[in-house]
Image (spheres, grey):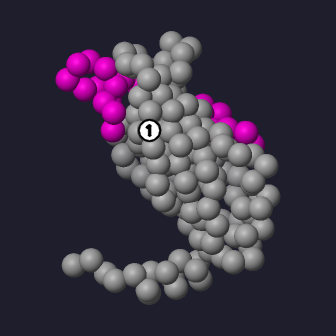
Amino acid sequence: MKTQELETYLHEQIPLSLAMGVSVVSISDENVVLTAPLVPNINHRETLFGGSASAIAILAAWSLVHTRLAAAGMTRAIVIRRNTMKYELPVDDSFATRSFLEQPDRWQGFVEKLAERGMAKIQVGADLECHGRRTGHLTGEFVAFDTATLKRVNNLTPKLR
């Protein structure tokens, strides 16, 4: 997948990414790097709003799972199940986030389980960076579903009214 293709997908399917000014810098098997300007993500202290930091880190981590599955010919629904975000330093300028697999050796098992059972989960991390320094870290658990499993899960889940 090319960077512009992923960026267009994020902007169309996740409108918050467009409002945040997210750009896709690079995609590889090891990571996805996203950047964003400070201004649309600024807080009352003229630093990065924590919600924006978390959102872009989740986007980068989700994008890594999405692009790796796409490269393997496995288009799947991917959702975040849980995450923790550690804020280490204030961000006062444009920033980037670099995603990576927390345990790369588990990827093959994730793919095999997804193919076999129609659902699998994996841990993905993302480091937030500004001025060449790590300013935050996300650890997230992502779940991928095939269409049949997603429909079955949705039918079992009570609808919110």
- Which residue does the image show at 59% across and 33% down from the upper left? 98
Residue 111: image location, x then y, percent: 74, 63
Q: Residue at x 71, y 46 (%)?
A: 103
Q: Is residue 96 visible to us here?
A: yes
User: What x and y, as percent, mark residue 130?
Assistant: 49, 18
Nearer to us in this view, 114 or 68: 114
Task: Indicate left or right for 36 with 103 as reference.
Answer: left
- Residue 124 image position (x, y, % from top left): 60, 46
Q: Is residue 48 magenta?
A: yes
Which residue in the rendered view is the most extreme toward the top? 131
The residues colored magenta run: 23-51
Disc tally is 1
Position of 155 relative to 79 (above/below): below
Residue 43 higher or lower than 142, as above or below: above
Dot 1 surroundings within 10 Å: few (below 14), some, or many (20 or more)?
many
Question: Which element is circle 1 on?
Answer: strand
Asked whether residue 27 appears in the rendered view, the answer is: no
Image height of 95 relative to 118, above or below: above
Residue positioned 53% across, 48% down in the render: 140
Q: Which residue does the numbered mark 1 point to in the structure image?
A: 85
Q: Write down the quadrant of residue 115 in the picture.
A: bottom right
Q: Nearer the viewer, residue 103 or 144?
A: 103
State the residue in front, 22 or 136: 136
Residue 104 falls inside the magenta stretch: no
Q: Amino acid at mark 1?
A: Met
Q: Position of residue 39 (x, y in %)?
A: 31, 24
Query: In the shown orientation, is residue 6 left or right of residue 11?
Result: right
Give the quadrant of the C terminus: bottom left
Of residues 149 and 34, which is closer to you in this image? 149
Residue at point 63% right, 72% down?
119
